[in-house]
């Protein structure tokens, strides 16, 4: 058999083995690599290249080496799951870099991290002043996580004492001009509803690159042709306008009637509706 066929077959074999090893060792291998996993990745890639190109008779020894590396890596992962001490030895411990707005210079030196690199990582977290940081820690993966001081944290409904219900995740209902029936069903919708919505905005299904439905049942579309402008969904705005019209009608009824009981009833209903509008307004103007 010619050498080029040998190389082609061994390359396919190496690709298959690498794929199986990656599946076996889990998604962490391709997301956040520890120091040992980084070494394993480089070594395994070198061995796979050896398997692909070595045309000598002992090329199969590369597969043995790959298997040993995979077994050792899996053994380390199981050991880390069972023992905190093993995790600290293999992956090392997290290092505090900033505490109460004060940069810990000794820990920076320990991690061989310069001030410029620290500030760069903070800016990636949208933090531009170290004094605004309550706590910053470098994880074993090398990522830096930041907790801002109370006064610098974003304002949330919880801070205002407002309880909000869970919001359903948006669903992709059209992709590359093809309707996705399963996401539609999750939202309690169907193709007829989608056809009606597309007809309302004047868009054909084959022209839609991506279509999403939010928790309020509003359809957002991105077209293949970026020059075409698509109107924004107006359901929430229409609902807010309708509620305000109802409030105005109740106030008008209270002014137009001469019956005391009816006037009082209309006034109370108008005030109650005004209160409801103030509560739902933040949701309807987003």
Image (cartoon, rainbow, N blue to C red):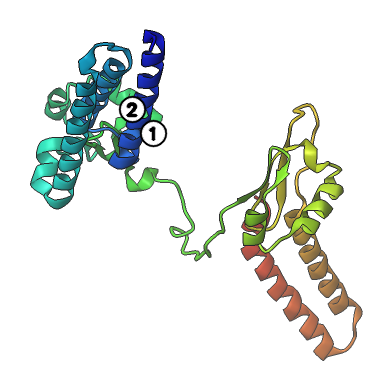
Residue 72 vs 180, above or below: the answer is above
SS under mark 2: helix
Residue 263 vs 19, above or below: the answer is below
Q: According to the image, label 1 marks what residue? A: 125
Label 1 – label 2 distance at C-alpha: 7 Å
Extreme residue toward the front, this view: 1
Quadrant containing the N terminus in the rendered view: top left
Looking at the image, can residue 236 be seen? yes
Q: Position of residue 241 (x, y in %)?
A: 79, 59
Label 2 crowd (10 A; few <14 / some 14-19 / many >=20)? some
SS under mark 1: loop
- On the picture, is 6 further left or further right than 65? right
Mark 1 touches mark 2? (CB < 8 Å): yes
Looking at the image, can residue 128 be seen? no
Say which quarter of the image contains residue 152: top left
Label 1 crowd (10 A; few <14 / some 14-19 / many >=20)? few
Q: Position of residue 189 (x, y in %)?
A: 71, 61
- On the picture, is 229 further left or further right than 214? right
Identify the residue shown where x is 83% and y is 45%. Answer: 201
For the image, the number of numbered tags is: 2
Q: Position of residue 280 (x, y in %)?
A: 64, 63
- On the picture, is 146 further left or further right than 246? left
Identify the residue shown where x is 80% and y is 63%. Answer: 242
Say which quarter of the image contains residue 175: top right
Pick whichever, 176 or 59, lies toward us: 59
- On the picture, is 93 further left or further right than 159? left
Q: Position of residue 261 (x, y in %)?
A: 81, 90
Identify the residue shown where x is 85% and y is 71%. Answer: 249
Q: Which mark is residue 18?
A: none
Identify the residue shown where x is 87% and y is 72%. Answer: 252
Q: According to the image, label 2 marks what residue? A: 121
């Amino acid at each position: 058999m010619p050498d080029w066929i040998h190389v082609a077959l061994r390359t396919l074999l190496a690709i298959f083995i690498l794929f199986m090893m990656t599946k076996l060792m889990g998604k962490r291998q391709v997301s956040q690599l520890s120091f040992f996993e980084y070494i394993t990745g480089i070594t395994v890639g070198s061995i796979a290249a050896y398997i692909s190109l070595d045309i000598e008779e002992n090329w199969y020894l590369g597969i043995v080496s790959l298997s040993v590396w995979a077994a050792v890596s899996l053994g380390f992962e199981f050991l880390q799951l069972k023992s905190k001490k093993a995790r600290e030895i293999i992956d090392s411990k997290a290092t505090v870099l900033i505490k109460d707005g004060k940069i810990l210079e000794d820990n920076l030196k320990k991690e061989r991290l310069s001030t410029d690199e620290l500030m760069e990582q903070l800016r990636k977290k949208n933090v531009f002043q170290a004094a605004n940081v309550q706590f910053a820690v470098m994880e074993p993966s090398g990522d830096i996580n930041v907790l801002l001081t109370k006064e610098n944290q974003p304002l949330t409904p919880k801070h205002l004492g407002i309880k909000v219900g869970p919001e359903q995740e948006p669903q992709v209902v059209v992709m590359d001009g093809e309707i996705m029936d399963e996401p539609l069903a999750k939202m309690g919708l169907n193709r007829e509803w989608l056809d009606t919505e597309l007809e309302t905005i004047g868009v054909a299904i084959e022209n839609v690159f991506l279509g999403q439905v939010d928790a309020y049942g509003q359809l957002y579309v991105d077209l293949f042709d970026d020059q075409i402008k698509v109107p924004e969904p107006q359901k929430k705005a229409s609902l807010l306008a309708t509620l305000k019209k109802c409030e105005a009608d109740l106030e008008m009824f209270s002014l137009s009637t001469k019956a005391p009981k009816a006037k009082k009833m209309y006034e109370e209903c108008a005030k109650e509706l005004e209160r409801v509008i103030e509560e739902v307004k933040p949701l309807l103007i987003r």
